[in-house]
Amino acid sequence: MQHLLRRKIIYILVVLFAIPFTGNAQLRDYLNLPDHDQKKFHFGINLGINRSHFSFTHHPLFLQQDSVMVVESVNSSGLNLAWLVNLNLTPHLDIRTFPLDLTFTEKAFEYKLTYPDRPGGEDTITQKKIQSISLTFPIQLKFSSDRIGNFKVYMLGGVKAEYDMASNAGARKAEDLIKLNRLDYGVEAGLGFHFYFPYFVMTPELKVGWGLGNLHYRDANLKFSNVMDKINSRTITFSLTVE
């Protein structure tokens, strides 16, 4: 009697253990949007958050003066809003762009001053914030894996051009500013995942951008600007795209 009871218990455990794998096998046989990847064009809405900062080099003047002792770039957060256009070249290769890609950031430099202008609002540690609203035009190649059920992974790389609509390079009264050029260009690389749902595709993506252009519109008469030479942008972006 106990032998039969043990056999029944083992049988029940085996059945319970096999149920999840049977369900997964059935799920793999059911593909959401099975013809999605065969379409020539895909369109989507992209929303993201970014962390950005400046990479910079010191000007020789930095070592020759004693007013500014330390300069550091401060990380800051921002938002991205874009419209995706994707062209399918082969089953594993796409080219894509974002005809409308707005990036909102607020980068900053932090200075340690020896002689702060306290009546002018300065302190020993002073931050100078630089707000930016950029219109970006990227061109990217996307290399995709085979689709596994309702999942796919991809890598991307490309180039971009940026136009900063909030640039202050033309400001005349800018004693307390750091002037930056409007135009920039750079390269990007990233990793993403496609999740196929019955009515849409959700794509989380992580992307890194390196600005190659020198953004600094250096003014030798500005103490917050003349201690630096080249300034380049650096950005990490996490975004979600719905196609």
Image: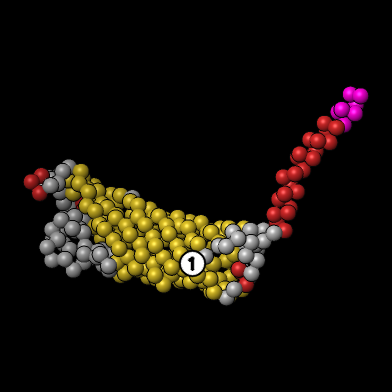
Instruction: Classify residue 231 by image quadrant.
Output: bottom left
Q: Between 180 and 94, which is closer to the camera in this rendering?
A: 94
Magenta stretch: give its range.
Answer: 1-7
Give the colouring mode of the picture. Answer: secondary structure
> As displayed, is residue 45 above or below residue 51?
below
> As displayed, is residue 156 above or below residue 50?
below
Instruction: Tell me if 26 is positioned left or right of 205 in this view.
Output: right
The local secondary structure at tag 1 comes to: strand
Q: What's the residue type where badge 1 is placed?
A: Gly
- Residue under circle 1? 44
Q: Residue at x 49, y 61 (%)?
A: 241
**Residue at the left extreme of this rendering:** 119
Most frequent secondary structure within the magenta stretch: helix
Q: Position of residue 23 (x, y in %)?
A: 72, 49
Whether residue 1 is visible: yes
Instruction: Classify residue 225 by image quadrant.
Output: bottom left
Q: How many marks?
A: 1
Q: Is residue 171 magenta?
A: no
